[in-house]
Amino acid sequence: MQAFDFDNTIYKGESAFDFALFVLKKRKRLLRYLPGIVKILLDYKACRMSSDEYLERLNKYAPIFLENKEFIQKLVVEFWKKNEHKLYPHILEKITPEDFIITSSPYFLLEPIMEKLNTTHFICSEANLDEGKMTYLNFKENKVKKFVEKIGKKKITNFYTDSYNDKPMMDYAEHVFLITKGKIEKIK
């Protein structure tokens, strides 16, 4: 069994950040929150926060961006029409039906494109769109915990990721492949 991170692994970029920018273009009044969102992204990429801190910081902005469930669901579909081309075809080819996509991206964001990802097994962050907040963050050590909770102690043969934020998953997997700008390098 293989497991794949999503952002910067299957998708060229950070899908949640790209989606936030997409929402900003549709709701210009939210532009004043951009510096705070960028700061969260930079701290995330630099591995400078725990899962709990990341969830707390995201929920500072989530109610503002997720305030209307129907509008957000409509925007997610529009977002993927515009950004589906950012999926790496050579990575998609590696995904089989028994593989897992284990990501910190929220489920609602990936839902419209799940059939294009060659598997039905997803472990994602969760949001309550009715309340406009993130409820679970699938980040760092939470990825392994949720995988084991869902599957048991089944071993991952190959894990594909772009980030050392996934160190717990890297340690759990037998082989690890680091994706950098679509290029694959075996590091374990």
Image (cartoon, rainbow, N blue to C red):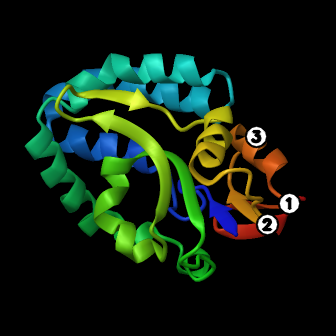
Under mark 2, the amino acid is Thr
Task: Say few, some or many: other residues with alpha carbon within 10 Å of mark 1 (under 14 / 14 to 19 / 20 or more).
Answer: some
Q: Which residue is mark 3?
A: 168
Task: Say few, some or many: other residues with alpha carbon within 10 Å of mark 3 (under 14 / 14 to 19 / 20 or more).
Answer: some
| Structural distance between the alpha carbons of marks 2 and 3 | 14 Å
Disc assigned to residue 157: 2
Q: Which residue is mark 1?
A: 174
Place of residue 76 in the rendered image (x, y in percent of width and height, measured from the top left): 23, 54
Under mark 3, the amino acid is Pro
- Give the residue displayed 47% in from the left and 70% down from the top: 87
Dot 2 falls on a residue whose secondary structure is loop
| Structural distance between the alpha carbons of marks 1 and 3 | 12 Å
Query: Which quadrant would the C terminus be assigned to in this image?
Result: bottom right
Under mark 1, the amino acid is Glu
Place of residue 28 in the rendered image (x, y in percent of width and height, measured from the top left): 16, 33
Dot 1 falls on a residue whose secondary structure is loop
Marks 2/1 in contact by CB < 8 Å: the verdict is yes
- Give the residue displayed 64% in from the left and 68% down from the top: 182
